[in-house]
Amino acid sequence: MSIIGVDRDLRAEVEQLLFLEARLADESRYEDWLALMTDDVQYWVPSGRADYDPDTRISFVNDNRSRLETRVRQLLTGVRYAQSPPSPMRRVISNLEIESTGADDMITAGTITAGSNFVLYELSAQATNELRIWAGRATHRIRRVDGELRIAAKRVELVNASQPLPTLAFLL
Amino acid sequence: MTRPMTGTEPRRQITNALDIADLVQPGRVNGLAYTDPAVFEAELDRIFVGGWVFVGHESEVPAAGDYVTRRLGLDPVIMVRDRGGEVHVMANRCSHRGVTLCQHASGNTGSFSCIFHGWTYGLDGRLRAVPQPGGMCSERDALGLHRPGQVESYRGFVFANASGDAGSLDEHLGPGGIELLDWACDLSPVGELQISAGWLGQRVSSNWKMWAESDLDGYHLGRLHASLWRAVPGSQYEAAVLAGEDVVTATTRDRGRGHVELEFWRGYDRQLAWLGVERGQVTDYCDALIARHGKDRAEELLWRGPPHALIFPNLFLGEMNLAIIDPLAPDLTVHRHTPLLLAGVAPEFNRRVLRQSEAAMGPAGFLLPDDATAAERMQIAFGHSGGWMDLSRGMERERVGARGDRVGHVSDEVTTRGFWRHWAERMALK
């Protein structure tokens, strides 16, 4: 992924978006998190590397906006027992690489692709109270909507995506 | 009406000897059945080694050299298709020093070669090549990959019995089990499943039997899964299960031999509710089904959709999903599932099934995470000393139906009792 030509202001703006998204997810602020997504958002957590057609092979999550809203609605009921109480979580995001596609002036018109690594610590507070560690690389496709950067696609390749996973009822 | 709670209390002796027979009593089961390591060891011997277990579906390995890795209890096996088209189930274990041969969940290979010393086996399990063969003292033909004592398949469903003395697969399935497998396959206009979308595993800190139970429990849907019905109103389960004890017409069925079923379809309010579509959206499918089965059977299938049933001990026919329950330890289980894709249907049909499967099942699905939470809290609750569970719900209103099946209200614990009844029989066999 090339980082040539990405100016520092844009990089800082993308970083702020990813940090904000991470904090909202950490704090189970589902509606605020959803507000960062575009109307045509795709949210994909593949089962293994993201090198397959999700229409022919199963994924942990493969949500369009409608299903993502359902997911959030379910969490907001307060009786989604797999996230009630919500897991205390903190993510660390790093190794950000940015490239732009589709326009010369990416700040105003283009689509930005941002790759980043994350480590997520989750206390599974609903039953076992284990500290779980999740790790992987996220790829965000980011667009400017009404002046603000918004997430048009998020893909999360977990390090252990080929293996059985414990409950994953929160937003990655 | 209440029943006196009598009977021998199972007690851990100083020797840790536990009488397994005491754990299952009429209307109640002791939690030690989930937590005691000796019970787990006995289950591996008597159920997962001593009996038939589901391994995989032949359509998972369509081409020569295609393989998947599975377990018979804790013992790793490979299911592979050879160049002649035959499907084999063999130990995933080199006959030399016991290293696993396949590391991946699935793949395609021309042979199985051990990383340690390089012994190489054909797709039929025969030992083909040994480096530096001059020093070999054992008979090569006797060193092929170990095989379970019995391997049989029915309509592509491959089962194995490691011990070799579990009777026939026909006996294990019985007419009730055969009917369930036929029913699932008959949903395809060509009578065949296409299990090709891969499996998602969910790792849960609970005993495996909680999954055999909760997958077949019609009583918990309204409470444990309330968040889903609130988020997605209008599902087929509202009429079938959630409408109220006196209103719903869905039933539970114990088909014997541990094969148990939730008959949601009896409570559906229309055809194709199970697929979430109107007939006009799947006209080709309906026509093809009528062409294959005739009008009566096709219309019945369009109403019923797929079965919701357990084939004892480890295969869950979860409507448009297959699931395998893998016991790893008394308090550790992997529940894995794959969408029940059909051969002979349009790609959009299977895509819909795939999306529904992702919605319901797996660690991020809208249903199973809540089941995992309840199962993990059961495991915690039984601690060291166990304690009784009440499973008497519906004992006095269940009735005996065709073939000797026991049938009850959809919320009744007919299925759970049927599971435990067979479990107790199997565990009594030394």
Image (cartoon, coloured by chain):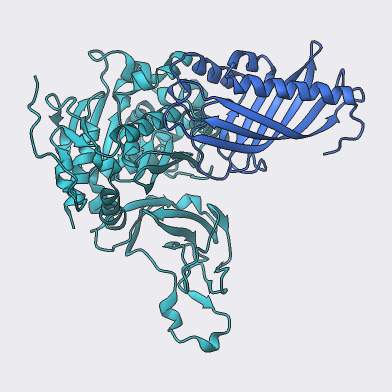
Chain colours: A blue, B cyan
Residue B190 image offset from top left, x and y in percent: 45, 43
Direction front: furthest residue: B14
Relative to B183, residue B280 above or below:
above
Residue that lies at the very extreme toward the bottom in this rendered image: B134
Left-right relation of B177 to B7: right
Where residue A67 appears, as percent x and y from the top left, is 57, 21
Question: Residue sitting at 37 percent across and 29 percent down?
Answer: B374
Q: Quadrant of residue B243?
A: top left
Instruction: State the image quarter where residue B376 is shown.
Output: top left
Q: Position of residue B330 (x, y in %)?
A: 34, 45
Q: Is residue B352 visible?
A: no
User: In this view of the protein, which residue sits in the foreground, B292 or B50?
Assistant: B50
Q: Is B303 above or below relative to B40?
A: above
Q: Is residue A132 visible?
A: yes
- Quadrant for the N terminus of chain B in the image: top left
Left or right relative to A59: residue A103: right
Residue at the spot x=43%, y=58% of the render? B76
| Viewer-proximal residue among B251 and B4 | B4
